[in-house]
């Protein structure tokens, strides 16, 4: 029994060993261990609760995927921030001392951590304002794809080539972003083409509308229209305008399908697709 007491006393003395002093508080190995374990448990608890919110609680509220994701992530930030304050207070650390520490960190943020801090704040703004949300089809710069994840630092975009592209949150605040499905999934596509000057323009209009009507991905309402745009140098320029909700994530496919059908139908009806050409007149002159 005496041996056990000595062992426990040695363990206690070891854990009570002062590592450093923060303000009026002595930071011991025991306090530091409890502090680290508390943070780990806080993060684990936050992940479990957020997962329950996303998969169990919020789906019952008939919210869309983007809204569920935004609420869950805002809750994560609030839960972890509140938990950290409680852990620090429970550990006996004077909050006023941390103010000096945070002030020092603020200087570091102004220099080396400016980008990280900017992305974090931008992430919060995105979750609140929701200019983009999980499931949206977006274009930013040369990147086009579906938003599959919004984190504190960056947004993950999945392209049609099944490639994940990580874009910093600040880019979505500072740059122009095209969101194809921000309000709804009803999108209009424009299919331009040129035909020969000898073509019957009313027949071209009729055939283009037939192409749109025969494509199952093109909506009947709003109705498709054909516009005679301009008299080009070598052709008459037309534009087929259609509406769809089914292929906004595969813009290239619906454009390709319509182009194939337009070429076949117009060729069957002897509508010529012109190519640039020049008339050269040779003038004989006597010298």
Image (cartoon, helix red, strand yellow):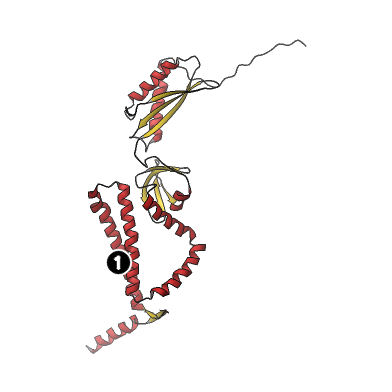
Quadrant (top left/top right/bottom left/bottom right) for the C terminus: top right
Coordinates of residue 146 in the picture (x, y in percent): 38, 44
Q: Tell which of 197 and 23 is nearer to you.
A: 23
Residue found at x 22% / y 49%: 60
Quadrant (top left/top right/bottom left/bottom right) for the N terminus: bottom left
Badge 1: how crowded within 10 Å, few (<14), some, or many (20+)?
Answer: few
Coordinates of residue 131 in the picture (x, y in percent): 39, 47
Residue that lies at the very extreme toward the bottom in this rendered image: 2
Q: Tell which of 88 and 31 is nearer to you.
A: 88
Coordinates of residue 229 in the picture (x, y in percent): 48, 24
Residue found at x 40% / y 53%: 125
Residue that lies at the very extreme toward the right in this rendered image: 287
Q: Say which quarter of the image contains residue 30.
A: bottom left
Residue found at x 45% / y 17%: 201
Residue found at x 50% / y 66%: 107
Q: Tell which of 252 and 78 is nearer to you.
A: 78
Report helix, strand or loop for mark 1. helix
Coordinates of residue 194 in the picture (x, y in percent): 48, 22
Residue underneath mark 1: 41
Q: Is residue 71 above or below residue 211?
A: below
Q: Say which quarter of the image contains residue 140.
A: top left
């Amino acid at each position: 029994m005496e041996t056990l007491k000595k062992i426990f006393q040695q363990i206690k003395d070891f854990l009570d060993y002062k590592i450093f002093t923060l303000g009026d508080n002595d930071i011991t190995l025991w306090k530091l261990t409890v502090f680290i374990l508390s943070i780990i448990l806080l993060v684990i608890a936050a992940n479990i609760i957020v997962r329950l919110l996303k998969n169990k609680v919020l789906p019952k509220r008939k919210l869309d995927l983007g809204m569920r994701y935004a609420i869950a992530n805002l809750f994560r930030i609030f839960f972890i921030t509140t938990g950290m304050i409680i852990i620090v207070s429970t550990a006996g650390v004077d909050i006023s001392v941390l103010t000096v520490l945070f002030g020092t960190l603020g200087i570091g943020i102004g220099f080396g951590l400016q980008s990280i801090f900017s992305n974090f704040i931008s992430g919060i703004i995105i979750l609140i304002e929701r200019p983009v949300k999980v499931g949206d089809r977006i274009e930013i710069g040369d990147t086009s794809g579906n938003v599959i994840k919004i984190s504190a630092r960056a947004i993950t975009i999945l392209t049609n080539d099944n490639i994940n592209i990580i874009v910093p949150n600040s880019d979505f605040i500072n740059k122009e972003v095209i969101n194809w499905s921000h309000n709804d999934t009803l999108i209009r596509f424009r299919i331009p083409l040129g035909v020969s000057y000898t073509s019957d323009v009313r027949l071209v209009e009729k055939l283009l509308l037939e192409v749109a009507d025969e494509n199952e991905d093109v909506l009947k309402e709003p109705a498709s229209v054909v516009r005679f745009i301009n008299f080009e140098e070598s052709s008459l320029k037309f534009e087929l305008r259609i509406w769809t909700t089914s292929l906004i994530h595969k813009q290239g496919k619906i454009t390709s399908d319509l182009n194939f059908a337009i070429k076949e139908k117009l060729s069957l009806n002897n509508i010529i697709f012109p190519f640039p050409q020049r008339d050269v007149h040779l003038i004989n002159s006597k010298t």
